[in-house]
Image (tube, rainbow, N blue to C red):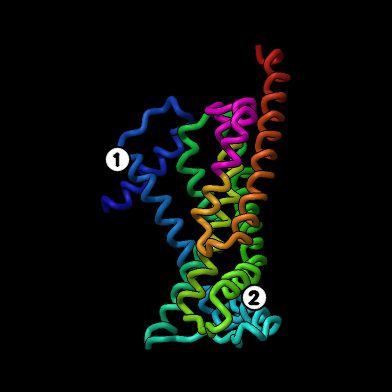
Amino acid sequence: MPGKSQTMALRNRRRRVHGPDDEVTLTEHLGELRFRIIRSLLAVAIGMILVLLQYESLLRFLTKPYRNLCRARPDFACDGTLYGLGPLDGLAARMRISVYGGIILALPVIMWQIWRFVAPALHRREKKYAVGFVVSSVLLFALGGYIAFWTLDKALEFLISWSGSDVEQAYQITKYVNLVFLMVLAFGIGFLFPVLLVFLQLVEVTTPRQLVMRWRWAIMLIFVTAAVITPSGDPVSLFALSLPMCLLYGLSIGIGYTVAWRRRRRAPAVS
């Protein structure tokens, strides 16, 4: 069975690779990548099944901001109902919610597989931060998703107000689901920005001093990026994403200074 022998060889190879100085062939590298992708896809599939089992309650949860807004603003002429404009809209919405929800539920596994794929290229001192990076990535993504969902009704209120008083709101279910999950995805990815900065400081690609010197450019880049990736395009979502990213930028610099200080303290003992 060549497939089984190849799998065993790949596992043995993973045990032998300990650092960036170990040589890895292109075939082994691609085999490792395929192994990590398969595990991530299996985690997403399991997450999709769990979401499908709770579809009705999850749909009510996702539409709650829209329904609350319609009750609070009767002048908007909406009742919180979503419409299917085609025979496939209901099925498409169910599948999209299951896929998006499966990815979110599988995020810890996906982040761990990414780290395991990158780890062989790192030194031993950098590998010890694996759990911290995975946990912080998941928590920051969840925080970003929560803020996106918390600001959703405010973003909808702004968008409906600008559509005009004579426009009656009738939202297609698939487009509403896309907006919600794209908002969560944009905020979640945006909140992962400091994790990348801390990683770059740990591997000494950049330094805290360089980040401090470029803080004006960083803030401008944060606001431009937030304006681009925010699907709703409203100022409420823009500031709700960019302001925490600015704070997290400063936090990542503080973590970088702490790590550099600890390294300087250990340096005499190592030498």
| Residue 106 shows in the view | no
Q: Nearer the viewer, residue 244 or 105?
A: 244
Above or below, comparing residue 55 to residue 4 in the picture: below
**Residue 26 vs residue 216: left or right?**
left
Q: Amino acid at mark 2?
A: Pro
Residues at badges 2 and 1 in contact (C-beta under 8 Å)? no
- Is residue 206 within the magenta segment? yes
- Is residue 234 within the magenta segment? no
Q: Nearer the viewer, residue 171 or 266?
A: 171
Image mark for residue 27: 1
Residue 262, image x and y in percent? 71, 25
* Residue found at x 59% / y 86%: 78
Mark positioned earlier in the residue sequence (2 or 1): 1
Please name the residue that numbered disc 2 is placed on: 65
* Residue found at x 56% / y 40%: 196
Magenta part of the chain? 199-221
Mark 1, secondary structure of its residue: helix
